[in-house]
Amino acid sequence: MKLLYLSESLNVNAMRQLKLVALSLDIPEEKLISIINDIDPSNKHAEWVLRQIKYKNIRVPEDNYRVKEIISQFKQHQSRLTNKDLNQYKKISDIESELEKITETGSKREGAFQVNPEKLQGVKLINQDGDYNLWEITDPESLSIMGEGTKWCTRKSYPDCQAKSYIDDEAVIYIISYKNIPRIQFTPNFEQVMNRNDEDVLLNHLVKLLEPIKDGLLDNLIEESDNMYMDEDNYVLDDVMNYISHTLERLPDAEEYIMQSPSHAIDYARDILKRKWPEAEPYILKEPEYAYLYARDIIKDRWPEAEPYIMKSRISVDYATHVIDGRWPEAEPYILDNLDLLFQYIKEIINTRWPKAEPYLIEYLEEEINNPANDFDIVGKLPYSVATRVVISSYIRNYFTENDKWPEIRPFIKYFYTEGWRGKP
């Protein structure tokens, strides 16, 4: 019922946004819909909420209460705000800051620790660098006390305080303070690294302070590497890459492990090395999706050694479009054998009538008519029972002139007006 309710309430843009967020963050649509309904039952501000989730300005469900409060305060003080449209605020912190000035509550978030952390249970000072301190916290109550004065959902004053949940899940949470003021909180796997405003932040200026944690990550990686294949799920390697993405630090001791994971190798070459990485290429080469990204983002040119693998994959048209920037004759026999790729290739590369493809389209149409299926295709998420007819209708409508003839399609015209299908070729 919630899915139906939300679908009826949202505009087309918001529904599209919901599907994209669900896909990119791997959140089931039903769960995302439930979260939106909880935060904003009217769905009036659903598109703004979805953008906050998409760009990781908030985390759900732990930030649900925070977002509810902002929407409530926005409605209450809308006439006094610079922007009367919530969508004009790109980040939740932008509207929070303005509301704090109006309600005169912002100054409460500037204070130092109210209690000496070293006197709290389960708190340990593990490193110092000038005025910066790195604290390790294993007790939920202490974590909630140390979060006061920030916008973290783990702070004691947060109505739905998540301190216990975080300690239960992670066992330990780290806080960086500067001159006794809590500045940054992060999880041991570096998935969440948040400043006082609860926004993701880089740690590249604090590498020296983080050395004990970095050393522990590297020790775990080396210890676990014998038990894991780098091209499979490797959470220890994921932790190392999260650390690297937040510190932008090159880690030579980890490179032999990173290069064996094509996805991580590409990120490392692009963001850290900022160049080609020959040692990693044998691992990337035979993985078409990653080989394409490596060619597009790092080589910035064709990668001949990888093309025999790419041309036979579902990424072949993307490679032709974004790397070759034109037709790819060697790949066309494989493209013609896949309706989705064929449709994409005609639209993005050929962009005119392509007689060579027409016998294949007829063949797909015959198969569709003789073997209707209830499954769904990739092209527009349409039922297979009409997918080829959609492609052919679009093909004729966009690339045929009034004088063009295609006699082979005529025996099949009647099928474009049956079984509930009314697309005219």
Image (cartoon, rainbow, N blue to C red):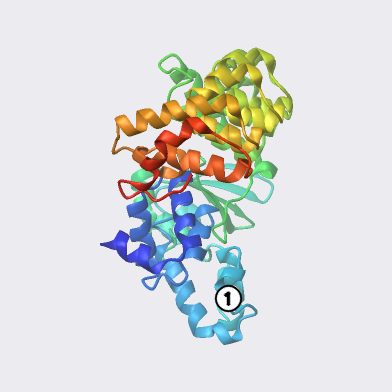
**Rendering quarter of residue 326:** top right
Please give the count of numbered marks on the rendered protein. Answer: 1
Residue 5 in the image: above or below residue 395: below
Q: Is residue 298 left or right of residue 263?
A: right
- The residue nearer to you, when weighing 325 against 145, is 325
Q: Residue at x 45, y 77 (%)?
A: 72
Q: Residue at x 34, y 39 (%)?
A: 385
The x and y percentages for residue 157 are 42, 68
- The residue nearer to you, when weighing 13 against 246, is 13
Q: Residue at x 40, y 63 (%)?
A: 64
Q: Is residue 64 left or right of residue 348?
A: left
Q: Residues within 10 Å of mark 1 (few under 14, many from 20)?
A: few
> Which quarter shows the N terminus?
bottom left
| Residue extending furthest toward the bottom | 79
- The residue nearer to you, when weighing 417 against 298, is 417
Residue 354 in the image: above or below residue 107: above
The x and y percentages for residue 372 are 30, 35
The x and y percentages for residue 150 are 53, 63
* Residue 76 visible within the image: yes
Q: Residue at x 59, y 28 (%)?
A: 355
Label 1 SS: loop
- Residue labelled with disc 1: 85
**Rendering quarter of residue 153:** bottom left
Residue 330 in the image: above or below residue 63: above
Q: Amino acid at mark 1?
A: Asp
Q: Is residue 62 left or right of residue 332?
A: left
* Residue 160 visible within the image: no
The x and y percentages for residue 214 are 57, 32
